[in-house]
Image (tube, helix red, strand yellow):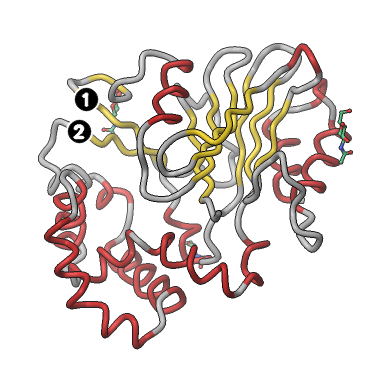
Amino acid sequence: MMRAVVLLLLGLVASCRAEFAPPTVNISLDEDPELRWAPLLKVFDVEYLKKAAAEVIDTTVPKWVHQLGKPIVMVLEKYMPQPYAGEIRGLASYLGGDLADVVILNFAYEISAVKVKSSYACVPRFCTSIVAQDKNGHVYHGRNLDYPHPVLRNLTVNVVFHKNGKTLEEAEDFQDAVMRLSKIPIITGVYYIVGGVKAGEGAVITRDRTGPADIWPLDTLYGGWYRVETNFDHWLPPPARDHRREAANKALNATGQDHINLDTLYEASTD
Ligand SMILES: *[C@@H]1O[C@H](CO)[C@@H](O)[C@H](O)[C@H]1NC(C)=O
Ligand SMILES: *[C@@H]1O[C@H](CO)[C@@H](O)[C@H](O)[C@H]1NC(C)=O
Ligand SMILES: *[C@@H]1O[C@H](CO)[C@@H](O)[C@H](O)[C@H]1NC(C)=O
């Protein structure tokens, strides 16, 4: 099964690599769904967003599917549950764009999951994610770009969700967040790479649509000071032509727990 890789950093990011620090936006879940993503417009240029949207659609969705699909998508939109329908409608209105296109964009991953099965060639361009812990108990979290669309590079953003004026909707702490991420039904399989703020708080959750397939936590007492996730279940060997897991493991072994920090992690995840 094809799964996306989602990296979640719980708690505060102490420092970001200086070359490019993505902007941070607060999204309030108390706001009307149609309005809550408006803060994105403060950090991104609308013209650039439109260009990125057009590029992703052009390269992901075949033209005839795109044209043929629009009426179908509009029907789908009627059945999309809240708050997603409202959020998508809001985004379409900020972009002054076509609602069908924004709906399609939100399913670009599911659409490309189908495509990837038939054209394996683009898989190695998907991402590598790492969660690691140094000797002092600091947890680090790194990943490279998930989607094969360079235009998205400039659209990286840190999102802090607020509800009732507080950060993170329901989870009490790291354990609780992992349990929630493991159980909540989702529409397609996914890998969640989760990092917390305290020693030991790191895990890779392999998800099926209905629940967890596997939870793989850091296990520093027994040498498990890092976990690497690419796009394959960690307990299975990756396809022979995909060397990302091996390369990241090698780089991390060479670095060692004594020398892991944001810079060495960056090197390991871009090797
Ligand atoms: C986001 O919310 C925090 C409080 O949680 C506040 O300190 C910060 O200024 C807000 N940032 C923006 C861009 O509104
Ligand atoms: C990202 O933004 C930078 C600076 O604005 C620009 O030079 C670069 O071409 C952009 N990259 C892409 C892939 O659009
Ligand atoms: C990395 O080190 C671990 C623990 O010593 C070892 O099991 C693994 O085979 C090493 N991986 C690579 C690619 O060197």
Crowdedness near tag 1: few (<14), some (14–19) or many (≥20) residues, C-alpha within 10 Å: some
Instruction: Tell me the amino acid under the disc marked 2.
Output: Leu
Q: Is residue 192 left or right of residue 167?
A: right
In which image quadrant can residue 77 be found? bottom left
Q: Quadrant of ligand 1?
A: top left
- Say if disc 2 is inside 8 Å of ligand 1: no
Q: Residue 159, how many percent across, how many down?
A: 36, 38
Q: Reading the chain from its start, which is encountered first: label 2 or label 1? A: 2
Q: Is residue 92 left or right of residue 236?
A: left
Instruction: Tell me the amino acid under the disc marked 1.
Output: Lys
The residue that disc 1 covers is: 163
Q: Is residue 235 left or right of residue 77?
A: right
Q: Is residue 37 left or right of residue 156?
A: left
Secondary structure type for disc 1: strand
Q: Residue at x 26, y 48 (%)?
A: 42
In which image quadrant can residue 15 be found? top right
Task: Give the spatial CA distance, label 2 vs label 1.
Answer: 5 Å
Query: Which residue is more in the foreground, 118 or 84?
Result: 118
**CB under 8 Å between callouts 2 and 1?**
yes
Residue 192 higher or lower than 1, as above or below: above
In which image quadrant can residue 138 be found? top right
For the N terminus, give its image quadrant: bottom right
Q: Which mark is residue 37?
A: none
Q: Residue 212, how many percent across, how many down?
A: 49, 33
Q: Residue at x 25, y 52 (%)?
A: 41
- Say if disc 1 is inside 8 Å of ligand 1: no
Q: Residue 240, how many percent across, how many down?
A: 81, 60
Q: Residue 198, how many percent across, how many down?
A: 56, 13
The residue that disc 2 covers is: 29
Q: Residue at x 58, y 40 (%)?
A: 18
Secondary structure type for disc 2: loop
Crowdedness near tag 2: few (<14), some (14–19) or many (≥20) residues, C-alpha within 10 Å: some
